[in-house]
Image (tube, helix red, strand yellow):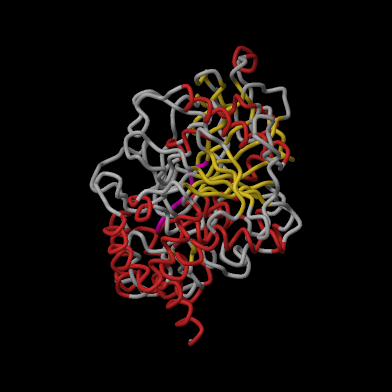
Amino acid sequence: MLLPVACTLDPMVVKTDAGYVKGFDHEGSIGFLGIPYASVERFMPPKPVVPWDTVMVCDHWGPQAMQNTSGRKLSEAEMSEKNSCVLNVWTTDFKASKPVMVWLHGGGFDSGTSAWDPGMHLAQKDVVVVSVNHRLNILGFLDLSAASPDYKYSGNVGMMDVVQALQWVQKNISKFGGDPGNVTIFGESGGGGKVGTLLCMPSAKGLFHKAIIMSGTILNVNNKAMTEELGLAVMKELGIDAAHIEKMKDVPYEQLYAAGQRAMAASIGTRRPGTPMMWGFGPTPDGEVLLQQPFQDGFADISNDVPILIGTTFNELQRLSYNRELTLQEARRELTNNFEQETDDYIKAFAKAWPDFTPQDLLSIDWLFRPKTIITADAIAETRNAKTWMYMFTWRSPVSKASVHGNELKFCFDNLRPGDSDLPDPTEADYDLADLMSDIWAQFATTGDPNVPSLPRHWEPYTPANGELLELNYNVRFLNNPDRELEKIINRHCFKQLDSFRKRQQSK
């Protein structure tokens, strides 16, 4: 490919293995938005991107993956089936060899976009930031393998896209000033689930070296029998048999998605919001692409040498009670619905863990992620070679009075902005916390150890015995096993659906 000299000398132009891309000044970093990293065919594994012979101007977000938009119409440039395998890069020095942080967005395995969390400010912490769009929901995780061996991998192609993006990083990131030998994957919510999944994928081994899992320990209970059953149910809903499976590639997305929802209800069941586990259109262990589901009982042995930073927020997705008056006795009566005869034990354990609690806290604390995060951290700290560190984000929004799911993102990305819905007027203390958190995240990516000089003392790796927990708030402090007894009670009472599922599986 021959280009005008002016293009090749442009300081914003970088040559990738597929073609030239041109970045732009993105609030003090050099940003490249919407770089294609893969070519895709429906239900098939990704392939390398088709090269281009012009300079691709990467100054706007690429299309998000197909997903339910509740009737809102989006253009092909905004949402695409064929062209959504794009990634974004932020850097400050093309000639450097900086640690690389690859961000995987939230939204479960069903929705979301990398545009939610831009990396231009985090990149100014002496790292190169990459974020990824990949196939989601029924296009990323419809298992048709029971109908045809030609679709052997269809149930995991969404995660295979992510591996393809990591391979792109290995081939190209040095041109952007990144070190392909020092890559950290990190994600929140569903993105944390994707990080955990990558820790169990042989094809991802060696493509990353550290992992950060943020509020991501919802347990995926998909097994091969479940996803095969669901795949056949989708075909039945569409009136397509195995002899004509190729017709699946021609079904309009909206019809395909709707058929998927009906099929789930008719076969393995529909997941309700707040359910402490996920199933359906998400990754499934097949012994090849994915060895096992992540989290409870840890990760596959192939990731034993990968350091992990893991944590949660104080309230996560719990229904909040901060907008109403509440006495301790009133809270006790409501808690009885969940904790029955252990309600008083729950309150006593809560008081021990969080002595300054309010009655509203008793009902509003996270009952979903923290128990499984402790179980996961206990398992990996005792079975893996690499170290584990744990945090809890307890900063509270002046609007919601809570520390909810995703509140920490603007802090670790150092992206505080006046007018934000849950932080309309950031204070100096807010900016200081964002500076500290982004320092910690970048330091972990750099060395595999999150200790920075501004911490009150040395942050020790987590063990079940020390329960070392860094509390991230205006008053940063270390706690040691503050809530182990409390979380055992929560785990016993809030995960009965998971226990029932496991009993059914054992009886089959």
Q: Nearer the viewer, residue 398 or 181?
A: 398
Residue farthest along the bottom direction in this orientation: 507
Quadrant of the rendered image containing residue 84: top left
Q: In the image, 498: left or right of 98? A: left
Q: Main secondary structure of the magenta part?
A: loop
Residue 333 in picture, x, y percent from top left: 28, 64
Tell whether 271 sits left or right of 371.
left
Quarter of the figure that contains the N terminus: top right
Who's the residue at 56% across and 29% down the image?
122
When the figure is inspected, residue 318 is found, relative to residue 285, above or below; the finding is: above
Residue 457: % across, % down: 68, 37
Residue 165 visible? The answer is: yes
Q: Does 380 appear above or below 469?
A: below
Magenta extent:
132-137
Left/right placement of residue 359 relative to residue 308 reads: left
Q: Is residue 381 above or below residue 230?
A: above
382 vs 47, nearest the viewer:
382
Name the residue rendered at 66%, 60% in the picture. 464
Query: Which quadrant holds residue 185?
Result: top right
The question of residue 133 being in magenta is answered with: yes
**Which one is in front, 105 or 215?**
215
Q: Is residue 499 above or below residue 53?
A: below
Name the residue at the top extreme: 6
295 drawn magenta? no
